[in-house]
Amino acid sequence: MPLIINLTFPSGRYHATPWGRHVNEGVTEWPPSPWRLLRALIAVWRRTCPDFSDAQIRRILEPLAQPPRFRLPPFRVAHTRHYMPWEKKGPSDRTLVFDTFVSVDRFEPLYMGWPGAEMCADDRAVLSKLLANLSFLGRAEGWAHAELFDDTVDLNLGPADPSDPSPVPVLCPDPATAFDDEHYPTLDPTKLAKGKIAPSRFLFDCPRWHLCLDTETIHEQKWPSVPGAKWVNYARPPEVSTVPTKPQPTDRHKPTVARFLLDGPVLPLVTDSIRVAEAFRRGLMSLYQRHRHRRKYGHTDRPYQELFRSEVLSGKNADGQFLRQHRHAFYQPTAEGSDPRRITHVTAAAADGFGPDEVVALNALRTLRLDDESPELRVQLVGLGDQQDFRASLLGKSSVWESATPFLVTRHLKLRGRKRDPREWSQGREGQQAFVAQVLREELERRGLKDAVIEPLDGIGARRLRPLQFQFYRRKRGDDGGQRPHGAFRLRFPAPVRGPIAVGHSCHFGLGLFLPAGSME
């Protein structure tokens, strides 16, 4: 039975730089180097299967030291560019780094085979165990899944003909010297006994094979060639090999919740919830605009040529009209750390879900600044999914909910007409509280939350903050949030209801938020 290894790359990428080339040259190793594969199997052996003997492993690797044949999946070479901190000329100095990789279909296999190799059943079982424990090949982000292939396949790529004008050099083990120890470094026994050998001089606990030489030693010795390896010219893969573009499914599920963690020298107070929520929305809308503009017009520094508006992120349609169904994003800052005064998380929740372009903006948000005078906060997306995927209290189920931020009424007191409110609601503090409670009941019923028992609260949160301590005004011309009647309440439902519960004026900006007060289910 021929010896064939089936390799797939779950990330859709193979990251590896050919030996002797700098990573920033933008050159990729393709097909994968057999020398790299054998060294990876040795590493897997010592790390995960140390019970196998040296003789067993050598018996398995010797057939694989011959130059193999390949069958490659459709591929294309791609790269990304990153400006990494350099600081050679100062704190703001950056250097351009290329990350080049081979892009393949994550389900398309690559076959590497040795048609003339023979291996007994016991040795095949050992090799299968090593392959099963191989998690990556090349760089650590080049995830790999490997297994023995027990069928036949046409291995159509092999060593090139000597007359081939443009072969591809591939680093392969040299069967004659791969398991020798001529160049394997030795330690002075006298210095070793006296403990004068630096820890860096000890190699890994491996057999004294050239295949086991670590990269640092190979570079340090400046050998003209890699001991135990040789270059083999292979036929160049056809240039027409490309990854087919798959149509995007139209019914792809959209995540409805995104959770963010805030970090910085001084975290904002919960009383600034509306400012944090506004800054969050503003940042996401800016990133969405930039992403859509670049996707349509390319990477250009020209001013924006048209306005791209996300209904989910902005709460407005293409004509700039406000959406009334509350299915767009709620931005809800919460204090979930040891200090109940400081905001640590922001949850963006939208019943209509976040599309691919909105997800790009959510992933791109890294910093947040409430205003020009506030310190910059670091932002990290820590979760993206649906309500049931999170354990955050505002997304849980409970029968009792209490105000985490003040509730602001959404209408004015009606003193005339058939639907006028009781006149006593306009008289004194108790009358105003009754009016605010009635508007809260109306808002809850509009959201399908009926039969709630509404009780007023003297303060908000563990520190019993007064509602007047919170910011009510948005950075919006004509906003009258600070002039609206408001209050803090406890809601008791006959059965547990699932959050988030946010109602009232500016409920999409952190106000009118309720959190579970009793046990969660």
Image: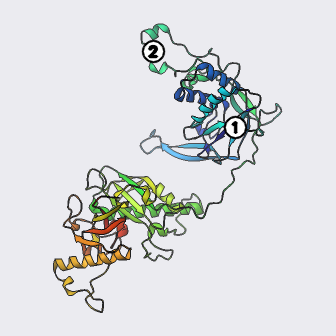
For disc 1, the marked residue is 149
Of residues 350 and 321, the one nearer the viewer is 350
Where disc 1 sits, the SS reads loop
Q: Amino acid at mark 1?
A: Phe
| Disc 2 crowd, CA 10 A, few/some/many (<14, 14-19, 20+) | some
Quarter of the image that includes the C terminus:
bottom left
Q: Nearer the viewer, mark 2 or mark 1?
A: 1
Query: How is the structure coloured here?
Result: rainbow
* Classed neighbour count for the residue bearing mark 1: other residues with Cα under 10 Å, few (<14), some (14–19), many (≥20): some
Task: Give the label on residue 62, or none.
Answer: none
Across and down, in percent, residue 155 comes to 76, 38
Q: Is residue 189 visible?
A: yes
Query: First in sequence: mark 2 or mark 1?
Result: 1
Spot occupied by residue 66 in the image (x, y as percentages of width and height)? 72, 26
Q: How many marks?
A: 2
The quarter of the picture where the N terminus appears is: top right
Q: Is residue 47 left or right of residue 431?
A: right
Residue farthest to the bottom? 417
Name the residue rendered at 70%, 32% in the picture.
170
Q: Which sits in the foreground, 229 or 502?
A: 502
Placement of 84 over or under 124, stated as above or below: below
Q: Residue at x 66, y 25 (%)?
A: 61
In-front residue for pair 71/437: 437
- Of residues 89 and 156, the one nearer the viewer is 156
Residue located beneath label 2 in the image: 197
Compared with residue 235, is residue 521 higher up or lower down, i.e. above or below?
below
Q: How much space separates mark 2 and mark 1, taking CA atoms?
A: 46 Å
| Residue 511 spot, x, y in % from top left | 31, 67
Kindly tell me whether residue 409 is visible in this rendering.
Answer: no
Quadrant in the picture for residue 248: bottom right
